[in-house]
Image (tube, rainbow, N blue to C red):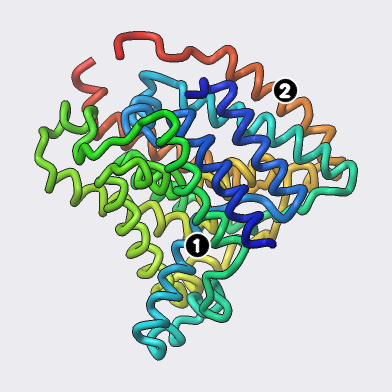
Amino acid sequence: MMLLLGLVLGAAFGAALQLSGASSHTKITRALRLKDLTIIKLIVVAIGVGLIGVHLLDLSGWANMKVKDLYLPGMIVAGLIFGVGFAVSGYCPGTALVAAAEGKPDAWVTVLGGLFGALVFAFMFPDLETILFSFGEYGPVTIHGLLGIQGSILAIPLGGFCLWLAARLPGSGGAQ
Amino acid sequence: MLGWWAGGVAIGVVLILAVALVQPIGVSTQYVVLDGVLLHHVLPDVASKSPYLAKTAPGWTLATYEFFFVLGIPLGALLAAMVTSRFSTRVVPSEWSKRFGSNPGHRLVWSFVGGFLLLFGARFGGGCTSGHMISGVSQLAVSSLVFSVALFASAIMTARWLYGDGRKQ
């Protein structure tokens, strides 16, 4: 039953990514080159809806939250490495799967590179753990937790701001 | 085809349903799980030597909610691509060939390198675009905000440098 639920939710996610063009190398690349912000607007709307929805669920006590631990230097290095991979491949780990399903060979190879990168990380982990994760560890902190307030007080206006921002950002202006 | 508005709402709704029914969404961990299960199948001793693999793929099984969620992504994408008849077997994307030429081997090598960095970075940071940017930022997680800011700063600088934007325009 849980497996079927996973498959259905995953399929809905994959279909949404495919239908909104998030698996397009052209759209991702043009977004990162700041020439066509459509994909940025898509992500900002998703986060805006997520902020409001997740925190409304939380208020009702129905949310299954799972906040990741903060390792301050490690998290920055990780984001920087990921960003280079994002720009070079033009995919992220999820959209590479979507583009692979569309038949794009470079996405298949991105997935293979990803499997290899994950494997190398797994075997380097004991060493990386002692070097980078040993300091600057703060646990699963949230902004509202740090401020000592209820999450929805911050999340709902912030979610509204995201939706406003997405509407205000320029779209695919300029030549395609 | 969905515009950014409808597409963004659809992704947000999937996240809300996932948080209500099970847990926030995530993709990149399952790359490790697939690695671990495959490696354990071929070389069980080597796989068991990695505490990270053993911890990430408990029981060396793919029959989990998390793996099936990720398995569903290409499945849903395939159905959507069939409906919109948007299939493509091009090796070199247009932006890439405009800048680097149409050599398919060149594009594939860099796709592999890009994929390697994506998952190495994602496992290092404990999440990717799905787990950190969409799920994590929606929960107001500080780790996810830090990861997302670093990710976008690095991706934008790399893309602009890679595609020569500072010089030509």
Q: Position of residue B157 (x, y in %)?
A: 35, 34
Residue that label 1 marks: B30
Q: Who is closer to the viewer here, A29 or B44? A: B44
Q: Who is closer to the viewer here, A102 or B54? A: A102
Q: Given the image, what chain letter belongs to the residue carrying mark 1?
A: B
Q: Quadrant of residue B104?
A: top left
- Name the residue rendered at 67%, 51% in the picture: B24
B147 relative to A159 in the view: left or right: left
SS at badge 2:
helix
Q: Residue furthest right?
A: A60
Q: Tell me if mark 1 has few (under 14), some (14-19) or many (20+) residues whose alpha carbon lies within 10 angstroms of its own.
A: many
Residue that label 2 marks: A160
A65 relative to A14 in the view: left or right: right
Gap in Å between the C-alphas at discs 1 and 2?
A: 32 Å
Q: Who is closer to the viewer here, A98 or A32? A: A98
Q: Position of residue B91 (x, y in %)?
A: 20, 41
Q: Amino acid at mark 2?
A: Gly
Q: Quadrant of the C terminus of chain B?
A: top left
Q: Amino acid at mark 1?
A: Gln
- Name the residue rendered at 11%, 35% in the picture: B102
- Name the residue rendered at 30%, 51% in the picture: A108
Whether residue A73 is visible to the viewer of this picture, yes or no, is no
Q: Position of residue B72 (x, y in %)?
A: 52, 52
Asked if residue B50 is positioned above or below residue B102 in the image, the reply reads below
SS at badge 1:
helix
Q: Residue furthest bottom?
A: B45
